[in-house]
Amino acid sequence: MEISIDDFSKVELKVGLIKSAERIEGTRLLKLIVDLGNEERQIISGIAEYYSPEQLIGKKVIVVANLKPKMIRGFESQGMILAAGCKEDEDKGIKPTLLTVDGDVPPGTRVC
């Protein structure tokens, strides 16, 4: 499905710095606190089987910042962290890999 540039421009992508990460017991979820420059957000991500909390702290990632908040297992998720490799790619041996930035880009910088 193709989308227009106007549709794409509605998606707000920002650089986020992972400040803290912890496993949500009994799930494949991690609860992350991500610095977006002018605010911190709690993001729930299903990457616990691929990343330990210790691997994520200090990592700069790409966040969908204007995604409507959603309750996941009793926790509010206020965004989404982007990764390459989706469920259907796992059959090909490709595990989800977080999208990061190269260089010294401050948290909150918009991706365009």
Image (spheres, rainbow, N blue to C red):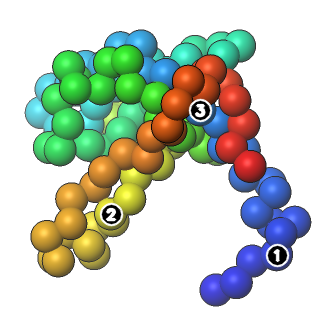
Residue 43 higher or lower than 57, as above or below: below
Q: Is residue 10 visible?
A: yes
Under tag 1, what secondary structure? Answer: loop
Residue identified by numbered label 3: 15
| Residue at the front extreme of this rendering | 103
Rendering coords of residue 83 (x, y %): 40, 52
- Measured in 3D between alpha carbons, the distance from the residue under mark 2 to the one under mark 1, in whole angstroms, is 24 Å
Q: Quadrant of the N terminus?
A: bottom right
Question: Which badge, 3 or 1, is on the more N-terminal residue?
Answer: 1
Q: Tell me if mark 3 has few (under 14), some (14-19) or many (20+) residues whose alpha carbon lies within 10 angstroms of its own.
A: many
Determine the image quadrant of residue 84: bottom left
Under tag 2, what secondary structure? Answer: loop
Q: Nearer the viewer, residue 17 or 33?
A: 17
Question: Residue 85, labelled with which disc?
Answer: 2
Q: Is residue 28 left or right of residue 87?
A: left
| Picture residue at 20% right of the left edge, 19% below the top | 54
Rendering coords of residue 63 (x, y %): 56, 39
Q: Is residue 68 visible?
A: no
- Measured in 3D between alpha carbons, the distance from the residue under mark 3 to the one under mark 1, in whole angstroms, is 23 Å
- Measured in 3D between alpha carbons, the distance from the residue under mark 3 to the one under mark 2, in whole angstroms, is 19 Å
Type of amino acid under label 1: Ser
Question: Which badge, 3 or 2, is on the more N-terminal residue?
Answer: 3
Type of amino acid under label 2: Gly
Residue identified by numbered label 1: 4
Question: Which badge, 2 or 1, is on the more N-terminal residue?
Answer: 1
Rendering coords of residue 40 (x, y %): 58, 15
